[in-house]
Image: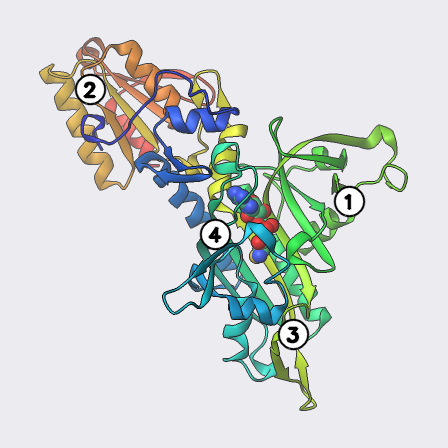
Amino acid sequence: MRLSRYFLPLLKEVPSEAQIVSHQLMLRAGMIRQSSAGIYSWLPLGFRVLRRVEQIVREEMNAAGAHEILMPAIQPAELWQESGRYEDYGKEMLRITDRHERPMLYGPTHEEVVTDIFRRSVRSYRDLPVNLYQIQWKFRDEIRPRFGVMRGREFLMKDNYSFDLDLAGAMRSYDNMFMAYVRTFRRMDLTAIPMRASSGAIGGDMSHEFQVLAATGESQVYYDVAFEEFDFLAAVADEATVEHLKGLYAATDEEHDSASCPVPAERLRSGRGIEVGQIFYFGTKYSKPMGATVAGPDGQEVPVEMGCYGIGISRLAGALIEVFHDDAGIRWPESVAPFRLGIINLRPGDAACDALVADLEGKLARAGVEVLIDDRDESPGAKFATMDLIGLPWQAIVGPRGVKQGVVELKNRASGERQELSPEALLGRMTA
Ligand code: 5CA
């Protein structure tokens, strides 16, 4: 991709409406634009990140045995009247009336819709467990949308729903998702601490929130220092790990009580957290009122045991920046970066520079490496600043002096390390 032909509307000034660094950087780097309060458009660079985050989540869900579906954004009110949540949900629910005066709503979550699909399709315990997920836009009319995509009104969520015959099965599903979450966040280089949480509007008996520590996090969190000693990025995500993590104390504000906290003061840490995911076990809360039953081994109809599991895909784009940035801009981990490599052509119009850049472009494209080439007619300083701002993991600098000597400069955005190497060596490094 050539920057001269790309749609990357950068901002020079820090936008005054943005209070936290991820929101500022997403606006400055041309990733998003606000449409109305808490509602954003994703521009090409931001959309690439959103898609990469989504793809990691999708791969880990598939690997964990969940099946992808897509439910409608617009739902009939009837289903929510059946579950008993229609009135309770209050003003956060965007209520709509269609031309036939039927009450509809823009889905803030999908327990009712998925339970309806299940009850119309599954009859026997032999067909369990079932685990269905989707990646879909939600709408919650938050009273105070803020921090850009971190607390939006419209936001992209991965949500899945498990159906089991009994409690033991539901616990296996819960732990299976817990494990998938450890794997998912690890692939994004994130340490997301699982914490006991209250289950809020979703309801239920057991819930964990996955919190990424960051100074700008919305939640106050408390946790055993053992979480700092545990290497999330190197851990094997197996059942033993799940048991270990579930056994350690960590809780959000609402759940934490210093009087009954089992962790001695010297081992208790507190900080701010960004909730990037939450999982719930809620048993028969929806299956009972909505009549989602299966015939058990003895032929008796029993309501299924359910759980649900959410990941804030659009929130993660912001959370990643909160964790991975410096004064110059974003520092994307490779797994979610919009492009792997940025090539700066210091002298567009110089035949030798142009030829080398074009050669690298062709070879990298054939090798499947995603590259953004800064071929604009700008000063070197402006080009370096842009590359640092948008945060691609690798930068290759091609200039007339280097080209004469047969070298380009490669910079690692995260560490700042630079080295000179031949174009062939660069290709080798990037395609390895
Ligand atoms: N039905 C369940 C999950 S299946 C559910 O709705 N869970 S949730 O309410 O906890 O949301 C799941 C995740 O979506 C949260 O962990 C958070 O990362 C993200 N999320 C929730 N509200 C917002 C919001 N207003 N803006 C951005 N992301 C949000």
Type of amino acid under label 4: Lys
First in sequence: mark 2 or mark 3? 3
Task: State the residue in front, 423 or 231.
Answer: 231
Mark in front: 2 vs 3: 3
Q: How crowded is mark 3: few (under 14 residues within 10 Å), some or many (20 or more)?
A: few
Instruction: Read off the residue under disc 4.
Output: 138
The CA distance from mark 1 to mark 2 is: 53 Å
- Taking the image as shown, residue 136 lies to the left or right of residue 383, namely right
- Which residue position is annotated with label 1? 255
Q: Which tag, 3 or 1, sits closer to the chain's start?
A: 1
> CB under 8 Å between callouts 1 and 4?
no
> Nearer the N terminus, badge 2 or badge 4?
4
Kindly tell me whether residue 114 is visible in this rendering: no
Q: Which image quadrant: the N terminus? A: top left
Along the line of sight, which residue is nearer the eye, 411 or 30?
Answer: 30
| Residue drawn at x 71%, y 48% as measured from the top left | 197
Front tag of 3 and 1: 3
Residue with the mark numbered 3: 289
x and y percentages locating residue 389 in the rendered image? 39, 21
Please report contact status of discs 4 and 3: CB closer than 8 Å, yes or no: no
Report the amino acid beneath label 1: Glu
Q: Judging from the image, what secondary structure is the residue with disc 4 in?
A: strand
Query: x, y percentage for residue 294?
Result: 61, 82
Q: Depth-wise, is mark 1 or mark 4 nearer the camera?
A: 4
Asked if the residue under mark 1 is in contact with the one under mark 3, i.e. CB atoms within 8 Å, the reply is no
